[in-house]
Image (tube, rainbow, N blue to C red):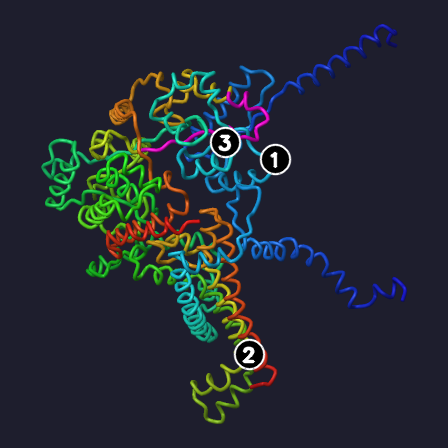
Amino acid sequence: MLSFSAKLRSVSLVAMTIAGLTATQASAVDITLWTLNFDNNAANVALKKVAADFEAANPGSHIEIVQRAVDEHKTALRVAAGSNKGPDIYFSWAGLGLGGEYVKAGLSLPLDKYYTEYKWNDELLPSAAAFADLYPGGKHGTPFTFKGEAVYYNKKLFEQAGIKDEPKTYDELLAAADKLKAAGIPAFTFGGTVNWHVMRLMDVILETKCGADKHDALKSMKVDWTKEPCATDAFTEFAKWAKDYTLQPFMGIDNKQSFSLFTAGRAAMMLEGDWLVGQLDTSGANLDDYGIFPFPTNTDRLYGFAEYNYVSTKSKNPDVAAKFLDYFLSTKVQQDLLGQVSSISVNKNVQYDNLKPLQAEWLDIFKKYGKIYMNGDQAFPLDVTTEYFRVINDVASGSVEPAEAAKQLQTFIASRT
Amino acid sequence: MSLRQTTHDPRVQALILLVPALAIYAVFALYPMLNVVILSFQKWNGLDPHRQFVGLANYSAIFTRDPVFWVAFRNTVIWTLMSLVFPPMVGLLLALSLNQKIFGRNSLRAIFYLPVIIAPIAVATMWKWMYDPFFGLFSQILTSWGLQTWIKDWLGNKDIALYSVFIAYLWQTVGFSMVLFLAGLQNVSQTLVEAARIDGAGRWAVFKHVTLPALRPTITIVLVLSIISSLKAFDIVYGLTGGGPAQSTQMLALWAFTQAMQIFDFGRGAAISVVLLLITMAVVIPYLRWTQKHEETGE
């Protein structure tokens, strides 16, 4: 039988344990991160490890990662927008399209004070960080990945057509396309069923024909597409590329089929993102057979887009959410994530070893360009993107004249309420 | 009347049995349907906490300013007309053939019915591979026959894409019509058939004057189901073309989904859904009433 003092000690111990547990629970901070279930499983695994490491370094904090497919993620964010529940941090694309819509709806917390507190701009690649400044009312989100898009070319086919150097200007690219055509080689391959694939060609031509400022003004719908001759010129040029320099037929195939045709040597070039290096590698292609160069637009901007993590305005713990983002963006974590989430880090202090030649080329491209121009589907609001796709496809298939295309797009923009 | 007597009343029993199903339908079918009608008069992007009443603005937008709505409308009409003709006709021909005492008819019935149980999205994937203009089955066959010039961009050519998708749809749905017709053929009186033959009727005359009239209830069911199924055509189009190229295979059901779930303009998506609902009712209800009337009068 226990003595009175022993009983007292036992009761005290239990009370202290309960008090301790209660205190732990009271100070525990749960942060929920809603993000995508990435096709690249290494990214999913790496994200969970980052969360676990952060929890270990910050006792009492818990990071819950909820992953969904793209459409489910978008829907979940909308459902959450109408309720008090939702994530502390959410993934979205950067730009005025999808990401901008959530910012406009007041779902994203301006992060200016955290950018200052954690000195994020000292660590981030300027081209990747630039997207945070796109929105009115402050800085929104921090970079998750940054994707650049450029022209991949088949060295053997270039050689076969007598092309010795990578095109540096748009005219040189046109000359190269003519040489390829003369040699019976289609210059580009695209997949038309996924609208955004062919859209890339229109985007880069628009940048070429209109220049940076006019291109931005057109995409932000601040100028009239019918009143800017460069817009019609771009549609005309786009129609020419689609008809004369693209592997036919392409409207009925998707980007994956297009990739197969590229690796099979059926076309000389593809306009793709930096992720294609990994795709080429895993498909068994010899990377030495391929080269890359930015589409020569004669502007000093790189074609690309970014994926961001945003802090929700509904977060009860924005400071901890920002702390987690800071941890995620830190040089050490980004160094560990290299090759898992992305081949190029958004942190400029990350060191690259044993890079494959194409990856090294990408790194040089990222370092060279400080400015970007975005994909049309990231720049436009969703409804305009849908119409942009339709008009582009109509021009590509030859059923709408270039001048009519600009008119149709402008009519749609003007009719928006 | 006591409680015991009340619960023994067949009408009360029927009501009690119906209540759970009614409750589920009210929550998951009637309420959402009503909500869609209300939503069609509102502007909402799914993000704003409040929906804004805009009257008929969504209807005005889809009828007058939407460059895709009338394309989708026309495609839906064409699709419905084709659905009214081809699946029932081919289904009837298959049923008549497989109603004969031929070798392996049960296996053949199963084979023709098999596509019905495959998920439409899987059917779309399969046909997408077959339609591949470079490596697809049809292109390979035409190439092996020396008919390369016949190879088309089956899903990328605006002039033929809708019909290419419809062929995949026909392949998938014809088995369903066939099974219904087979069931109907079992009810054709053999006595009448034999009597007609004794009277000197040929095969066509027997079919026209005995089999076809006996199949009238089945034909009604097949046509009504074909109309409903064609008006809500979605998954196979989504899987094969996504409505492209340049929205040339867009359908009303898919366009409603695109507006609501991809562009997140729920008001316009709802307005298109309401239009589709009205079209369905306008077509199906008069037809059902007409056939009911004819069956009652025995004409």
Residue sitting farthest toward the bottom: B199
Crowd rating for badge 3 (residues with CA inside 10 Å; few <14, some 14–19, many 20+): many
Q: State the SS at label 1.
A: loop
| Three-letter amino acid code at the position of disc 3 | Ser
Q: Are marks 3 and 2 in contact (CB under 8 Å)?
A: no
Is A308 contained in the magenta span? yes
Residue A14 lies, with reference to residue B160, above or below; the image says above
Residue A246 visible in this rendered orientation of the protein? no
Which residue in the protein does label 2 denote? B290
Q: Which mark is residue A108?
A: 3
Q: Are marks 1 and 3 in contact (CB under 8 Å)?
A: no
Residue depicted at 37% across the width and 45% down the height: A385
**Along the polypeptide, which appears first: circle 1 or circle 3?**
1
Residue B87 lies, with reference to residue B272, above or below; the image says below
Most foreground residue, A411 or B285: A411
Q: Are marks 3 and 2 on the same chain?
A: no
Q: State the SS at label 3.
A: loop
Quadrant position of the N terminus of chain B in the picture: bottom right
Most foreground residue, A131 or A279: A131
Tag 3 subunit: A
Q: Mark 1 or mark 2: which is in front?
A: 1
Q: Mark 1 to mark 3: distance in Å?
A: 14 Å
Q: Are marks 1 and 2 on the same chain?
A: no
In-image side of B290 versus B144 (left or right):
right
Q: Which mark is residue A29?
A: none
Tag 1 subunit: A
Crowd rating for badge 2 (residues with CA inside 10 Å; few <14, some 14–19, many 20+): few
Tag 2 subunit: B
The segment highlighted magenta reads A304-322
| Three-letter amino acid code at the position of disc 2 | Trp
